[in-house]
């Protein structure tokens, strides 16, 4: 190993603020990523850097490959061109520090396990010793406002509660990255707003990087540091929007802010153009 | 209300067999029955009571149920293992498909002659034949159930990096549990039928042989007593399984699809 590489490596591994100051190395990096399936090009030439702690939302018309990009980070799908790297390593397989929250909570939870049991699944998966599980489960359920529902089965819970449970299970992995595939798409407006605020509170507290796929443009602006606009046929990055809105965000003040309205207009016009 | 109604229904259901017994008893008395094929209900009851008192009936029952249960467990476990493997690994399933479909239609009792040559007359032959009969429901039902497991749950298990064994234990087995219960219920019926058949032909113990023995001793009362006893065992096993199924399905009922 050459001295330069070793130095670069050490610098890369230096935790905390120093890394930002010396080298803002991206946590997740797409480089000229393409995906062909059966002669059809699904994704073409996507290059994208996501920094640690960033909240990135991805929007775009259906069929533009939003979920495919997410699945590439998850290690479920391998690109046929270019590379997707996580901390410099190719995302060849699922990793313990990358957690996924699916839209269809009803299918993603184990119906034969209670809320506590569903969180336990993730703890069993990371090999946490049994005596340490109950405390972690209680803590996670409390964090998501499910403290009194540990013994309920998913079928006895509302959609919002089920999605909270899925988020609690994802957090049980202690992820550095949270991949969320339209997680609030099936929820009613009030529940969605509550969950948006709770998600921001949790990921800010813990410095979790978020890759959030959504078709709700206002949700994207409200949550994100950066919104990636994709265009279809084939899926590619068409535009990036830097969201400079102050944090913590607020369902009234943020949404009524002139910058929010300006971004909203820009995103709507972008989507309209992308769809036509 | 419903309790009373169902009790009345059950009482009505008993009318026919009890009436039949009375008619048979009366007919036997009037005609002065002295047959090598039939016996009066009172004579049957007497023979049954004697067999119960000298312990031979329960010894035979233990032999039959022991062999049936051993074969059931072996068959269901093998069937489940194969069914889950075939359901999970498509190439394996395609490889085995023709073989399975060729062997499956063979009536279990048709392999008795082969087994007698291989393992002689005895317990091994009985257990093997029962196991052979019990493999298929477990195999077929679990194979299709594994393919029906929610793909999202498989993805969750991949994302959590569960080992293949943990995936089977924590995701697949609970998912297909209702089908396993159905397979066991089907197999219990087969197990009893096949066990008694083998005892009549290849393993001279148990209830099947007790009937043959009574027949050869020209003792129709004892023969019919054993027959009724076998019917009672079948009924009791089914009731037990319904209870068990209600339990397991109670857990499965919580799997009701959510919004």
Image: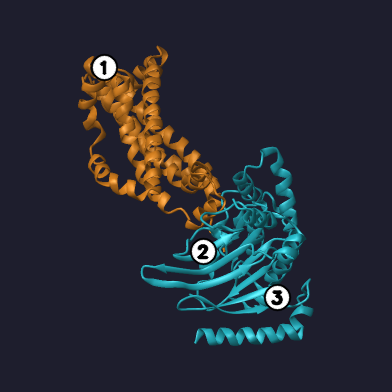
Chain colours: A cyan, B orange
Q: Which of A161 and A120 is in front in this view?
A: A120
What x and y, as percent, mark residue B96?
29, 44
Can you say whether B14 is above or below A44 in the image?
Answer: above
Which of the 4 image quadrants contains residue B79?
A: top left
Q: Nearer the viewer, residue A241 or B231?
A: A241
- Residue that mark 2 sits on: A83
Lateral position of residue A148 relative to residue B166, left or right: right
Q: Residues within 10 Å of mark 2 (few under 14, many from 20)?
A: many
Marks 1 and 2 close (CB-CB < 8 Å): no
Q: Nearer the viewer, residue A5 or A166?
A: A5
Q: Is mark 1 on a helix, strand or loop?
A: helix
Which of the 4 image quadrants contains residue B180?
A: top left
- At 23% from the left and 14% from the top, the residue drawn is B217
- At 71% from the left and 71% from the top, the residue drawn is A193
Mark 2 and mark 3: Cα distance apart in space: 30 Å
Q: In this rendering, which labeled residue sits more in front, label 2 or label 3?
A: 2
Are the residues flagged by discs 2 and 3 from a single subunit? yes
What x and y, as percent, mark residue B219?
26, 17
Are the residues flagged by discs 1 and 2 from a single subunit? no
Can you say whether A168 is above or below A66 in the image?
Answer: above
Mark 1 and mark 2: Cα distance apart in space: 78 Å
Q: Can residue A243 be seen in this view?
A: yes
Q: What element carries label 3?
A: helix
What x and y, as percent, mark residue A147?
74, 53
- Residue that mark 1 sits on: B213
Chain letter for the residue marked with disc 3 in the picture: A
- Residue that mark 3 sits on: A222
Mark 3 and mark 1: Cα distance apart in space: 85 Å
């Amino acid at each position: 190993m050459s001295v330069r590489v070793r130095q670069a490596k050490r610098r890369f591994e230096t935790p905390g603020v120093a890394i930002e100051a010396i080298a803002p190395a991206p946590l997740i990096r797409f480089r000229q990523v393409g995906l062909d399936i059966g002669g059809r090009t699904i994704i073409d030439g996507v290059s994208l850097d996501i920094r640690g702690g960033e909240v990135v939302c991805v929007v775009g018309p259906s069929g533009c490959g939003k979920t495919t990009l997410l699945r590439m980070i998850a290690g479920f799908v391998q690109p046929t061109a270019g590379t997707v790297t996580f901390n410099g390593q190719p995302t060849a397989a699922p990793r313990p520090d990358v957690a996924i929250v699916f839209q269809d909570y009803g299918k993603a939870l184990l119906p034969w396990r209670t809320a506590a049991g569903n969180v336990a699944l993730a703890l069993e998966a990371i090999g946490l010793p049994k005596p340490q599980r109950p405390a972690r489960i209680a803590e996670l359920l409390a964090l998501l406002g499910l403290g009194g529902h540990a013994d309920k089965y998913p079928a006895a819970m509302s959609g919002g509660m089920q999605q909270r449970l899925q988020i609690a299970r994802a957090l049980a992995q202690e992820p550095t990255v949270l991949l969320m595939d339209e997680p609030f798409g099936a929820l009613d407006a009030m529940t969605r707003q509550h969950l948006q605020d709770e998600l921001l509170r949790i990921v800010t507290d813990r410095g979790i990087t978020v890759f959030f796929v959504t078709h709700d443009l206002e949700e994207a602006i409200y949550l994100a540091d950066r919104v990636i606009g994709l265009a279809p046929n084939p899926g590619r990055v068409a535009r990036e929007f830097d969201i400079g809105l102050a944090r913590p965000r607020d369902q009234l003040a943020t949404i009524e802010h002139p910058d929010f309205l300006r971004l909203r207009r820009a995103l709507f016009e972008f989507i309209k153009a992308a769809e036509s | 209300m419903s309790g009373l109604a169902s009790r009345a229904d059950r009482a009505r259901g008993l009318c026919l067999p009890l009436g039949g017994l009375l008619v048979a008893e009366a007919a036997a008395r009037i005609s002065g029955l002295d047959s090598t094929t039939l016996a009066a209900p009172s004579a049957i009851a007497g023979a049954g009571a004697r067999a119960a008192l000298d312990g031979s009936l329960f010894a035979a029952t233990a032999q039959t149920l022991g062999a049936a249960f051993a074969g059931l467990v072996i068959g269901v476990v093998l069937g489940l293992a194969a069914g889950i493997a075939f359901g999970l690994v498509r190439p394996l399933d395609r490889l085995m498909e023709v073989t399975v479909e060729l062997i499956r239609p063979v009536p279990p009792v048709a392999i008795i002659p082969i087994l007698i040559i291989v393992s002689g007359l005895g317990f091994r032959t009985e257990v093997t034949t029962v196991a052979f009969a019990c493999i298929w429901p477990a195999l077929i039902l679990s194979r299709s159930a594994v393919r029906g497991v929610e793909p999202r749950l498989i993805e969750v298990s991949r994302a959590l990096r569960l080992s293949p064994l943990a995936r089977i234990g924590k995701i697949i087995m609970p998912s297909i549990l209702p089908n396993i219960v159905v397979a066991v219920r089907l197999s219990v019926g087969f197990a009893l039928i096949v066990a008694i058949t083998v005892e009549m032909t290849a393993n001279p113990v148990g209830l099947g042989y007790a009937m043959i023995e009574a027949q050869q001793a020209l003792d129709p009362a004892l023969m019919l007593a054993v027959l009724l006893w076998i019917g009672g065992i079948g009924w009791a096993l089914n009731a037990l399984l319904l209870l068990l199924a209600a339990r397991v399905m109670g857990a499965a009922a919580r799997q009701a699809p959510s919004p």
